[in-house]
Amino acid sequence: MNKQKWALITGASAGIGAEFAMQLAAKGWSLVLVARRIDKLAELKSTVTKQHQVDCRELVLDLSQVDANQQIFDYCQNNDISVSMLVNNAGYGVPGDFDAVDWSTHQDMLQVMLNSLVELCHLFYPYMKQTKNGHIINVASLAGLTPSTAGHTLYGAVKSFVIKFSHSLHLEAKDHHVHVTALCPGFTYTEFHDVNGTRSMVNKMSKKMWMSAVDVVAQGIEAVEKNQAIYVNGWRNRLIARMCKYLPENLVRFLMKGSVKKYRKR
Ligand SMILES: NC(=O)c1ccc[n+]([C@@H]2O[C@H](COP(=O)([O-])OP(=O)(O)OC[C@H]3O[C@@H](n4cnc5c(N)ncnc54)[C@H](OP(=O)(O)O)[C@@H]3O)[C@@H](O)[C@H]2O)c1
């Protein structure tokens, strides 16, 4: 009999996280879905379970609360759920200059997008290592590979951290048959830019720069199956990442100047 395989997805109520739920369920994964909006999670659970014969649990939690990660882990332990796929996806952008944003907003962002991501890896990785079977996708961003910008001050810094951290864990984990990938999407159609109030600005950008969550997620799953350490979605984004890596930073900054001004809210 096939052993039930469980995937845990944070930020599963919308966008890239919800798409991970749909595509992993289609591949036979049972799901633990984490987010704050109960109605969205319930709707997704109903769709997923109707379309695929998998188990699906919703955990309504705010990851900015420091005990949320332990609650997730305890829930899994108490319900005999052995997670062998972790998708750390929850995230959002905080526009504005650093000092114009109050500290609690910065602190929550760091908790959700940095501390929580690292702690969930720390909680769930040991079992994967022990069983020599596991996949971790940390959703980073192209912004973690491009030069720093004014405005959205912590976003690029947090995503750079996620990429560096994931790469180190990838190197440690590969001898234990655990795959770790930092997934780096560029602009993707989700609720992200509605939530941070930049939709009207980013809508002016060429449609060629945008990808669907469907493609981002399909490529992300393939990347972690192949155990790619860092995966940038889309050839245009890969070209930008290459330019940032190999061209002098001043030149890249000069080339990016126009778009940073146009599309970054300060
Ligand atoms: N869209 C893009 O252009 C883009 C580009 C590069 C990288 N990314 C990254 O992709 C990831 C997913 O973003 P998305 O584009 O799919 O955005 P989205 O559609 O706005 O989804 C964000 C998800 O994160 C959850 N979330 C936010 N704050 C949370 C909290 N405190 N506790 C628990 N869950 C929380 C939201 O759920 P609730 O509101 O229900 O809690 C939602 O499910 C993020 O890490 C983002 O940085 C996005």
Image (cartoon, helix red, strand yellow):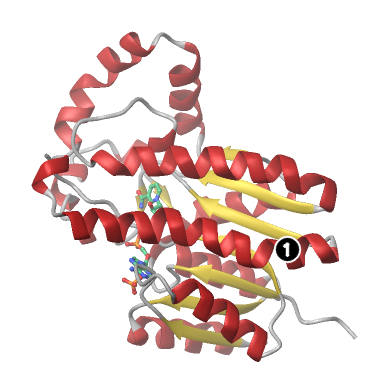
Query: How many circles with numbers are drawn on the protein?
Result: 1
Q: Is residue 149 left or right of residue 138?
A: left
Residue 5 image position (x, y, % from top left): 74, 76
Question: Ligand 1 lies in which image quarter?
Answer: bottom left
- Which residue is depicted at the point 49% across and 66% down? 19
**Identity of the residue drawn at 42% across and 36% down:** 144
> Is residue 147 positioned above or below 43 on the image?
above
Most extreme residue toward the right is 1
Examine the image and state in which quarter residue 3 appears. bottom right
Query: Is residue 265 in view from this perspective?
Result: no
Is the CB of mark 1 within 8 Å of ligand 1?
Answer: no
Task: Check the image and name the residue furthest to the left.
Answer: 100
Left or right position of 214 against 43: right
Pointer 1: what residue? 126
- In which quadrant is the C terminus drawn? top left
Other-residue count near label 1 (Cα within 10 Å), few / some / many at <14 / 14–19 / ≥20:
some
Picture residue at 39% right of the left edge, 44% below the top:
158
Answer with left or right where residue 203 lies relative to residue 47: left
Which amino acid is tagged 1?
Pro
Residue 239 x %, y %: 48, 24
Residue occupying image coordinates x 17% and y 49%:
198
As displayed, is residue 115 above or below residue 170?
Answer: below
Determine whether 196 is above or below 36 in the image.
above
Q: Position of residue 68 (x, y in %)?
A: 44, 75
